[in-house]
Structures are given as structure tokens and as C-alpha cells.
């Protein structure tokens, strides 16, 4: 079968022929119908050899932590899914037995690192192949009649912002303001989730007019360039400099600083992006009862909720389709920032 693999640190991924995998006891084989390309993949491929070794990622490694497919073959003992089922893959795998996993929060598994458990495509072979192995059928969520290509990215680009926003829902009532920094793959879905779940005024910030146009197309009330003028622009339309919540899908120093500038009493500054930066904290440095959170991915039950939002027509993912042979170009476009929404590979 064909697979898109990362084979050499610092080099572009390549399409290769590899043996079709066979499911072992308790495992499931999927015939992949769609796989999403994500900035997390770019992060992995941007690591130095030393950093890559520290993460413990193998080489070669089939990319893709957003996956959807049809159950193709069952390992011994699997009874909870059937051949032919259309499913989405829940990516943040855990041990399944710790306190967090018992709540369906495998994204916060207490033992994953200790046991060497990693998400597909971020530590072991993922979804950018004609077939993939799922270690346990609990990692599969029914897709039903949802189009796998149009919805595969919801397994991360929908689930991650949904989980981030849910933590701030009690604050996002009437008269509240939510700012989304970065309106790309995750951010443009976050805007839709905020519109679907809250009465908040949603303001999008990004670096060019094309991205701001996408933000307005998917429901942002206002969209401004993400620069030093943004706080004044927000104050002009809301009457206040401080906002209720800032969802940062970039997480570099300028966006962290911008989020801090928009923070007031009880503001949530939610850092979702993969970047790293610094900010001052403490009673004398931050407004009273303001908070900074760094959520990661989401729970299995939240993925079911996200897919239900899509089923109800309340959210969708802007997608550009690529064949498996053209998958390296998808990552090139992702790196260049020229995608409108999300790239989806169709093996």
C-alpha cells in the first residue's frame, strides 16, 4: 500500500510503498477514506535531530493524526465495531484505565508517557496511508452519514477548539466578547463553535485580509489585523478595551502579548497553539481573577458532540482536497500559509 512518511529529519515527507498492516488481537484495520494535514505535523517536521530524538518519534513514520475510514478487518476478540462501519478516529490515545481515561479524557491520560502511548501520526504510524491500524475500537467514533472528507478535520481542528471553548462557556454569556487569534485550520472552526454555543460578540484577528475574509465568511462579527492597533479597534466596536476570553491559535510572543493587552478582570487567555512564549503572572502583573489556560485536544465524548454540531449544520471545515500522491504539496501549502482552511488527503 501507499503511505506518506517522514523518513529523514529536516526533509519533506515522501510517498512510499509499505506492507499492508494486519490487525493483531483487539485491533481494528481501517481502509482510510480521509486524513487531515495539521500544523502539529509541521511542528514535528520542524524539530532538529536532537529534539526529534527527545520526543522519541520513530523514523520512518506515517503522518496523519486526523483520520476517518471504513472498518476493513477485525482483530481477534473485537466485537464493538463491524466490518463496513464508517468511523472517525479519536486521536489522543491513553491507557484507558487511569482516572482521566475513565472519564473519556484520554487527552489527559496520566500514564501515556510512562507507557509509551502516542497518537497516530505523532509517535507511530498514522492515517496518511491506504490502511491504518487502530489499537482499540474505543478510539473509533461513528461517522454515520457525515462525509468523511468534509469532516475528518473535526477530529482535531474541531475537537481542539471545542474543548478550549467549553472551559470558558460559563463566562461567555450575553454581552461578552470572545477574540480568536489565528483564523486558519482551527481558528475558523472556533469562530463557528462560538457562534453556535454562545451569544458572545466574536472578533477575529489575523495577519492578512484573506484570512480575515474567511473569518467573516464563517461568522465573525468583526475581523481586524493582528497588530498593535487591534486593541483600539476592538475597543471602538465593543466600548471596552478588555475582552471576556482570548483564544490564541498561534501562541508566539506577539500573540501572547496581544492577549495580555486585551485581558481585564476575569478574562480567560486560552493558549491553544503549539508555539511557546512568556508572559508575566501574579496579582501585581495580571488583572484580578484573570486566567491563562493551555488546553490540549479534547475528550472522546466531546468529539461525539463536535460531530453532532456538524450533523446539525452548525459547523463545517473549509477544506482543500489532495490525493495521497499530492500530499507533500499539501504540507508545502500548509507551511506557506496559502491554504483556505484545512488540507485533506484522500487515499
Image: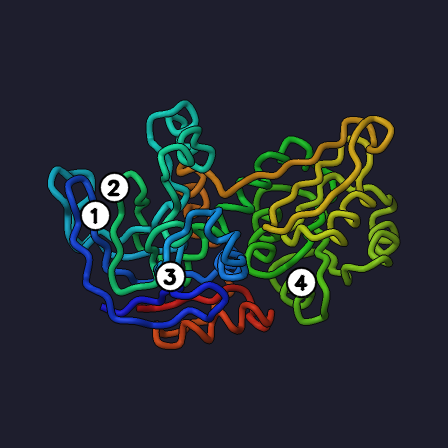
User: Closer to the N terminus: mark 2 or mark 3?
Assistant: 3
Q: Secondary structure at mark 2?
A: helix
**Depicted 249 relative to depicted 322: above or below:** above
Q: Quadrant of the N terminus?
A: bottom left
Residue drawn at point x = 39 percent, y = 58 percent: 64
Q: Position of residue 48 (x, y in %)?
A: 54, 58
Q: Secondary structure at mark 3?
A: strand
Whole-angstrom CA distance, mark 1 to mark 2, is 6 Å
Q: Position of residue 9 (x, y in %)?
A: 46, 63
Mark toward the viewer: 1 or 4: 1
Kindly tell me whether residue 235 is visible in this rendering.
yes
Residue drawn at point x = 85 percent, y = 33 percent: 285
Whole-angstrom CA distance, mark 2 to mark 3, is 18 Å
Q: Secondary structure at mark 4?
A: helix
User: Closer to the N terminus: mark 3 or mark 4?
Assistant: 3
Residue drawn at point x = 65 percent, y = 54 percent: 250
Asked whether disc 1 touches disc 2, contact meaning CB atoms under 8 Å apart, the reply is yes
Instruction: Give neighbour class at mark 2: few <14, some 14-19, many 20+ (Cα, 10 Å).
Output: some
**Left or right for 232, reference 76:** right
What residue does disc 2 label? 137
**Left or right for 254, reference 340:** right
What residue does disc 4 label? 216
What residue does disc 1 label? 28
What residue does disc 3 label? 35
Classify residue 113 by image quadrant.
top left
Instruction: Give neighbour class at mark 1: few <14, some 14-19, many 20+ (Cα, 10 Å).
Output: many
Amino acid at each position: 500500500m501507499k503511505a506518506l512518511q517522514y523518513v529523514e529529519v529536516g526533509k519533506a515527507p515522501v510517498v512510499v510503498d509499505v506492507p499492508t498492516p494486519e490487525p493483531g488481537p483487539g485491533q481494528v484495520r481501517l481502509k482510510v477514506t480521509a486524513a487531515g494535514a495539521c500544523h502539529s505535523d509541521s511542528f514535528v517536521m520542524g524539530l532538529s535531530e536532537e529534539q526529534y530524538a527527545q520526543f522519541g518519534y520513530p523514523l520512518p513514520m506515517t503522518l496523519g493524526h486526523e483520520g476517518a475510514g471504513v472498518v476493513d478487518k477485525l482483530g481477534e476478540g473485537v466485537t464493538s465495531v463491524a466490518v463496513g462501519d464508517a468511523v472517525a478516529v479519536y486521536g489522543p490515545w491513553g491507557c484507558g484505565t487511569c482516572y482521566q481515561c475513565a472519564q473519556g479524557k484520554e487527552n489527559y491520560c496520566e500514564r501515556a508517557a510512562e507507557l509509551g502511548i502516542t497518537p497516530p501520526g505523532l509517535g507511530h504510524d498514522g492515517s496518511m496511508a491506504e490502511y491504518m491500524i487502530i489499537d482499540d475500537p474505543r478510539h473509533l467514533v461513528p461517522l454515520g452519514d457525515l462525509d468523511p472528507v468534509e469532516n475528518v478535520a473535526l477530529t482535531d481542528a474541531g475537537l481542539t477548539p471545542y474543548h478550549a471553548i467549553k472551559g470558558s462557556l460559563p463566562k461567555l454569556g450575553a454581552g461578552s466578547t470572545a477574540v480568536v487569534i489565528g483564523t486558519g485550520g482551527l481558528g475558523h472552526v472556533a469562530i463557528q463553535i462560538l457562534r453556535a454555543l454562545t451569544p458572545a460578540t466574536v472578533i477575529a484577528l489575523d495577519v492578512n485580509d484573506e484570512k480575515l475574509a474567511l473569518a467573516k465568511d464563517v461568522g465573525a462579527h468583526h475581523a481586524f489585523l493582528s497588530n498593535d492597533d487591534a486593541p483600539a479597534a476592538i475597543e471602538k466596536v465593543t466600548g471596552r478595551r478588555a475582552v471576556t476570553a482570548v483564544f490564541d491559535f498561534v501562541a508566539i510572543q506577539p500573540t501572547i502579548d496581544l492577549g495580555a493587552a486585551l485581558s481585564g478582570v476575569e478574562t480567560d487567555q486560552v493558549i491553544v497553539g503549539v508555539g511557546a512564549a512568556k508572559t508575566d503572572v501574579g496579582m501585581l502583573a495580571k488583572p484580578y481573577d484573570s486566567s491563562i489556560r493551555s488546553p490540549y485536544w479534547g475528550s472522546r465524548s466531546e468529539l461525539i458532540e463536535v460531530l453532532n454540531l456538524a450533523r446539525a449544520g452548525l459547523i463545517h471545515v473549509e477544506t482543500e482536497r489532495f490525493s495521497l500522491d499530492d500530499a507533500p504539496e499539501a504540507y508545502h501549502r500548509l507551511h506557506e500559509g496559502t491554504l483556505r482552511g484545512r488540507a485533506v488527503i484522500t487515499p
